[in-house]
Amino acid sequence: MIDHTVAPMPVPDEQAEGHTRREALILGLFALAGAAMTTGCSSDKDAMDEFVQKNFKDLSPAELKEVLARMEKQYKAKYGRDIQVSATPPIEGVLFGYALDLSRCIGCRRCVYGCVEENNQSRNPQTHWITVLEMDKEKGVDLQNADAYYNHETVPAPGKFYMPVACQHCENPPCTKVCPVGATWKEKDGIVVIDYNWCIGCRSCISACPYGARRFNWGEPSISPDELNPVTEYLGNRPRKRGVVEKCTFCIQRVRKGLYPKCVEVCPVGARKFGNLLDPDSEIRYILDNKRVFILKDELNTQPKFFYYYGL
Amino acid sequence: MKAKVTLIAVAPPPFSPDMFPCSACHGLTDKVNRVPHKVDFHDTIVLKHDEKNRWCLDCHSAQHRDSLHLADGRLVAFTESYRLCGQCHGPTLRNWKAGEHGKRTGSWSSTKQYLLCPSCHNPHSPHFKPLHGREAPLRQEAIK
């Protein structure tokens, strides 16, 4: 069912007998604690199941179903409303690509907040997946002197241009290579994802990303239940917890169902373009064929699938 | 993999309130005055679109008031106004058809929705106006 680019991690021999060594150790600890408390409460079982859960890539279809059901139950208990957690597989023959027209972007930040609402980022402490950089038209792309905190009555400000930056979904991502536990990887459709339940919060990926695209939940993320987007994806916008890394997923919960990412839909100037790089008739291919596109920090050989261009 | 893509219009033409259909006021027997002059009922329209060379009836049909017309006289419905705009803005029309100009919404893999030119550009004054931006992100030191 679920098809992933990265082969499952080698499974120790113990699994043939029912449990891995890690699980056996943990189960032993829990058995001791359970014997001491004997509460018999179902949330204790859920907490233990969560604690011993495998990496997303190692889950069998049956296990995955159980995990998703458990999460929906836990989220319902936490937020008091129904939250749908899916694990939609990549579509065959699709490699996602994104293009952004710098000559049209006006720096209004509607994409930033559209993303926050769609992807359940923490409102307090504040987490934004998209950073909009303001730079001088005269100097061109000058990341060192870019300003992410500009604040004007109306945009665009005279003499300035704007460059929104989020995850570049590299074909050769440095962030996934440094993860010590295999909690982040590139999917078959090119989306770089994170298993928030496997992430240990070491933040190696944050230091490896040359684009500053990854965010760490230093505090307990908070969203009021009525602001929560209830249509979520395991590898995407399901609510996160403290101590894990998150970032743009091209709105995996939307694009794998054929929808455009939220930032594309909310952009008032149509600067954001999205589609299938393997479809010669897609608008993204039209842009690659007809516009002079560039990628950020090409000297690093990260091969982003996020392209910038000047359309005018 | 090629997607089977169909295009549909998403938004109706953005008429001014209570202005359409034009034939509610304009009849077939109207005297047609093609010399640019001030028009009482349309005095809120500020023409800033090659205004030295053009006037209402260069785009609006005098005989069929609920339609637009091309330079060769063929009628164009308001729902297909891009054909009119494309007479002068050829490369833009080409890019718009390919999905490069303008905003596509809906589905990248099946039904792409598009906006008509006047949904973003006021045809009488098409330059894109500045917008109010959303609030700046908190600085790192301000995040508690």
Image (cartoon, coloured by chain):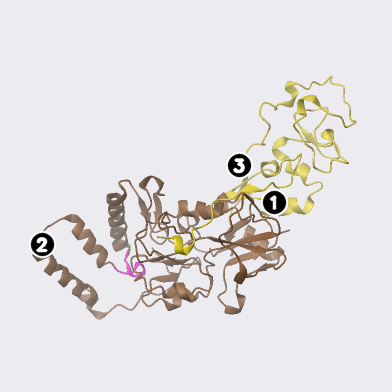
Which residue position holds label 3?
B10
- Whether residue A262 is visible to the viewer of this picture, yes or no, is yes
Q: Position of residue B57 (x, y in %)?
A: 84, 33
Residue B43 location, x and y as percent? 77, 29
Looking at this view, is B143 or A128 the one in front? B143
Nearer the observer, A193 or A32 = A32
Q: What whole-number distance in Å separates the C-alpha atoms at marks 3 and 1?
A: 14 Å
The color chain A is rendered in: brown
Q: Relative to A264, is A75 on the left or the right?
A: left
| Amino acid found under the numbered disc labelled 1 | Lys
Mark 3 and mark 1 on one chain:
yes
Residue A193 or residue B46, whichever sits in front: B46
Q: Which mark is residue A37?
A: 2
Q: Position of residue B92 (x, y in %)?
A: 74, 52
Q: Are marks 2 and 1 on the same chain?
A: no
Q: Residues within 10 Å of mark 2 (few under 14, many from 20)?
A: few
